[in-house]
Amino acid sequence: MKASAVIAASFGLACFAAPTKKAVYNDADILNYALTLEHLEDKFYREGLANFTQADFAAHGYDETFYQNLQEISFDEGTHVAFLTSALEGLR
């Protein structure tokens, strides 16, 4: 009886741990996920540049090139948002 209780408990745990449905993602799901991430990155850089000037960065030892790189990255993130948005519109 002890062995059957262990087997039953093991079977119950195995059924509980086993996935019941496999997730299926389409192109729109993947693009929406990527777009969400790009929106976060875009907002991060835009707000950072809006709240901190080049002088703020210079006061902490960063040169002008560093600030220019941040501006370029911010621009790129906006471009990524626009690209993924148009790609999603193309799927409709």
Image (cartoon, rainbow, N blue to C red):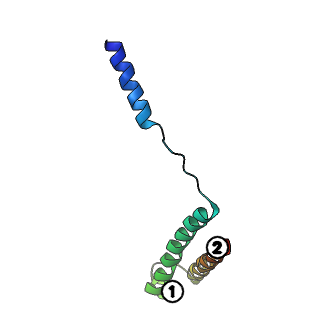
Residue at 48% across / 87% down in the picture? 53
Say whether disc 1 or disc 2 marks the residue closer to the N-terminus: 1
Local packing at callout 1 (Cα closer than 10 Å; few below 14, some 14-19, many 20+) is some
Residue at 60% across / 62% down in the picture? 30
Taking depth in this image into account, of 70 and 35 the one nearest to the observer is 35
* Image position, residue 65 (x, y; %): 60, 81
* Image position, residue 27 (x, y; %): 64, 62
Q: CA distance from mark 1 to mark 2?
A: 42 Å
Residue at 55% across / 65% down in the picture? 33
Residue at 51% across / 45% down in the picture? 21
As drawn, the label of residue 54 is 1
Q: Quadrant of the N terminus?
A: top left
SS of the residue at dot 1? Answer: helix
As drawn, the label of residue 43 is none
What is the three-letter code of the residue carrying label 1? Gln
| Residue found at the far top of this picture | 1
Residue 24 position (above or below residue 86): above
The answer to whether 72 appears left or right of 16 in the picture is right
What is the three-letter code of the residue carrying label 2? Arg
